[in-house]
Amino acid sequence: MNKRKVTFTVNGERHELVVEPNELLLNVLREKLGLTGTKYACGKGQCGACTVLVNGESFLSCLTLAVAVDGAEIRTIEGVAEPDGTLDPIQEAFLDSSAIQCGFCTPGMVLMGRELLNRNPRATEEEIREQIKGNLCRCTGYFSIVRAIKSCCEK
Amino acid sequence: MIEAEYVAPSNLGELFKSIEGRAERVKFVAGCTNVLPDLRAQNPAPMLLVDLTGIEELRRIEENNGVISIGSLATMTELAASEIIRTHGPILASAARALGNPLTRNRATIGGNIADASPAADTAPPLLALEATIHTEGASHAKREIPVEEFFIGPNQTVLNQGELITRITFPIPKDPSASSHIKFGLRNAMAISVVSVAVVLEMQGNLCHRARIALGSVAPKPIRAYLTEKELEGRKITEEVLESCAEVVKKEISPITDIRASAQYREHVTGVLLKRALWQAAREGENSTNGNI
Ligand SMILES: Cc1cc2nc3c(=O)[nH]c(=O)nc-3n(C[C@H](O)[C@H](O)[C@H](O)COP(=O)(O)OP(=O)(O)OC[C@H]3O[C@@H](n4cnc5c(N)ncnc54)[C@H](O)[C@@H]3O)c2cc1C
Ligand code: FES
Ligand code: FES
């Protein structure tokens, strides 16, 4: 196989890596960069646990080849809080609304919320529900997640 | 896991150069939402992955002399947001909005959707009803223009040759784009593959239907045009009775199967119901807009 050199930024930090053409972005993040906040569940695009932002847009990292994000700017759940550890308002909102139970869906949910708020700070409840359609949660029943994202919207 | 070589050409010239003499091993990849799950389920022979996503010229959505042209790399998110598509092909924008979920729509391309050729491919019924043409380019630059109704052969089968690329998809702007309607019916709101989907494009004069293009998804081995039903409708006024007879005729030209999502009998019934609803909506919009013109 022809290994390739790729360069991308993850949470503001530049990485230069050599990857196989068949390597998934998800595995590179978790295994090569140790960023295990991004979760591996179905591996088929069905659950959203592996969500990351690529150039600001939500991507399923289990369906993304690492070679294909050469040059991109990637944000994972580890890069949502400030570097000094101060949580993002949306992370505070998830805590305040008890929107986290087992936590497996949380990285994806927070990033989907972040993407929506960046694009549309006045999202309605319907738009929030539409936004998280592809992210499964087996614990919360979604209500508290929707409430958390909603509480970050401008009135 | 798959064994593969990978190339990411940045234009069509580079692409055809990189696959020269190797067409039989080529696997195009765009949004990867079909390719990666498929390849990981199989154990395929070593292949040459050709990543299309860097080819900017395949992304354009434009209007030229009454014809809409969509680059094969346009994503569902882009189609749903495009002013050109919303104005001139609203049923295609509707289908793009209805596919999967936001995470899938950000990646899923129109070229990948039709090349994958699922009987449930969401963009297929609108493209059939809009009488779209698929433009392709193969090795040694052989170009083809394939009417979409000849493009699908069966489940996940198309007339594409190995190494033949879909470059763009075109359709003529309908006389009255508002006299059209698209309904996707799934078992739940989130992420559902359709049980039945219907797309219609009508030409109306008042309440009289001059011309009808009707297409259906998930009710045959491939997405289909409902030619008999179109004949049944053309030249007649849209009344309850006419719609009822269309719903009967359409049952003769579909061949639904029973699967995990629904039984054949259920699909047959729902097709009739959705067809009536879609025709009614399209006719009402068309009537309003022709009245407005007079
Ligand atoms: C969670 C989830 C939900 C989904 N829901 C739906 C749904 O509701 N409705 C629906 O219709 N589909 C759905 N899909 C399927 C899929 O997202 C779509 O079919 C999508 O449009 C495929 O596009 P892609 O760019 O990802 O294709 P890819 O996976 O990159 O490619 C698909 C196939 O097309 C070929 N190909 C791609 N581009 C070209 C080209 N330009 N020329 C020639 N061949 C090409 C590839 O070689 C491959 O065989 C879903 C998928 C997932 C993971
Ligand atoms: S692990 Fe990627 S969608 Fe489930
Ligand atoms: S909190 Fe457990 S899956 Fe969502």
Image (cartoon, coloured by chain):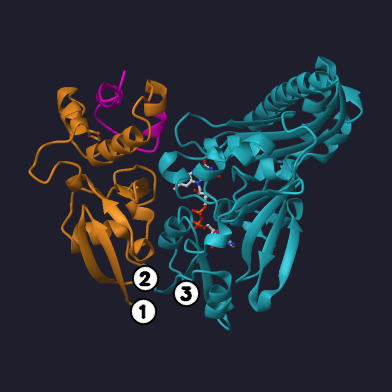
Residue type beneath disc 2: Pro
Look at the image and give the colour of chain B: cyan
Q: Nearer the viewer, residue B195 or B123?
A: B123
Q: In this view, does B293 lie above or below A3?
A: above
Residue topped by disc 2: A21
Q: Mark 1 and mark 2 in contact (Cβ < 8 Å)?
A: yes
Q: Where is residue B192 drawn, in percent x and y? A: 49, 36
Q: Mark 3 and mark 1 in contact (Cβ < 8 Å)?
A: no
Q: What subunit carries mark 3?
A: B
Q: Which residue lies furthest to the bottom in this view?
A: B21
Residue type beneath disc 3: Met
Residue topped by disc 1: A2
What is the number of the mark on residue B47? 3
Q: Where is residue B157 drawn, in percent x and y? A: 64, 58
Q: Which of B128 and B117 is in front in this view?
A: B128
Mark 1 secondary-structure assignment: loop
Q: Residue at x 67, y 75 (%)?
A: B141
Q: Which of marks 2 and 1 is nearer the N terminus?
A: 1
Q: Do labels 1 and 3 share a chain?
A: no
Q: Residue furthest left?
A: A84
Mark 2 secondary-structure assignment: loop
Mark 3 secondary-structure assignment: strand
Tell me which segment is drawn in magenta.
A129-155
Q: Residue furthest top?
A: B240
Q: Which chain is orange?
A: A
